[in-house]
Amino acid sequence: MAERRCALCGQPLPETLTQIEIDSRLQRLSTPVLAEERRRLQKEFEHQLVDERERARRRAEKNLRRDIYAANRRAKTAEAETASQLKKQAAEFDRKVRSERQRARREVESEFKGEIKAVLKRAIDAEAEAKKNIERTRKQTEQRLRAEMNQTVRNATRENELRLEKLQTDRERERLRHGVEAARLHGQLDNMSRKLEQQSGERLGEEGELDLVVELNRAFPSDRIERIGRGKKGADIIQHVFDGVNAVGRIVYENKNVKVTGWSQKFVAQADKYCALYETPYVMIVSRAFPKKEKDFCVVHEIPIVRPSMAVALARVMREGIVAIGRLRSVPRNKTGSTPDA
């Protein structure tokens, strides 16, 4: 007997696989996809069976016609043969027809069993592969989420560091810009200085404080500008910086509206004490007098010294830094100390 092979993949089929085992495995195909695949294969098998039967019939008829033709030729050339020989040839022909039909039936049955086995194997392999894909996808998703969370934390930390660096850079750039602006207005300031020198120091100081308070109130309406007043201990003016309803810091002003030649190093020492007194690094001296070889704007022991016309501009730079740092401090931090992504 010829070896049975699968009609789809060509692999040999085990001889021990019975129709009962095939039906039992088919019953285990419970999913709609496998059921649909089974119906499709059943239809294909039925069509193939019909086609195979038709081919077998045609082959049998062809063989029959060939045999009849040969028999007729033999009959014409052997008219002398006896009637018993004709009967023997007819019996042999019937036997061949029956044998051919049986062979065709066995071939069709073998192909059907091979197809069923291939379907079962593909179903089992597909289910195992689907489980592997689901587990692999789950692990990849978890790893990607952990990586994204770590990257988000690192990006948030780096972004806050960059913001702070940018604020510091912008502050320095603003200082330089105002230095250039001060140089351009130097002529006007010198004229004002000569006029102010003709007035008394006490009167200049009082008027300077009032003018600065007015300018600060006009420039920063959302902040509270506090003037300490003459004869009281402390700085001349305190600007309480607000971000919305939240107080985020202070800017302290020490007004020294003295003569151009009236600069004293004690001004810096006095302003430096205000840093600790008011708990803020933002302290400036507003003065018409400057240290030797300095004018308009300079920094002595980290205390900026500016002319009155430049005080509001410098205060604006300081205020932006105070607000930005206050907002960074208000951002909640996670366990690693970095701010979460917004």
Image: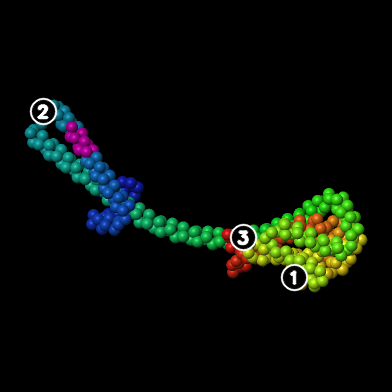
- Which of 10/187 is in front? 187
- For residue 156, the mark is 3
| Colour scheme employed for the rendering of this structure | rainbow
Name the spot of residue 216 as percent of width and height, x first: 74, 59
Q: Is 19 on the left or on the right of 258, as rendered?
A: left
Say which element carries label 2. loop
Q: Nearer the viewer, mark 1 or mark 3?
A: 1
- Which of 87/266 is in front? 266
Q: Earlier in the sequence, mark 1 or mark 2?
A: 2
The residue singled out by tag 1 in the image is: 278
Q: Earlier in the sequence, mark 2 or mark 3?
A: 2
Say which element carries label 1. loop
Q: Residue furthest left?
A: 83
What segment is highlighted magenta in the picture? Answer: 54-65
Q: Amino acid at mark 2?
A: Glu
The residue singled out by tag 2 in the image is: 79
Say which element carries label 3. helix
Name the spot of residue 222 as percent of width and height, x first: 67, 60
The stretch drawn in magenta includes residue 165:
no
- For residue 60, the mark is none
Disc 1 to disc 3: CB gap under 8 Å: no
The residue drawn where x is 35% and y is 56% is: 124
Q: Nearer the viewer, mark 2 or mark 3?
A: 3
Name the spot of residue 292 as percent of width and height, x first: 91, 60
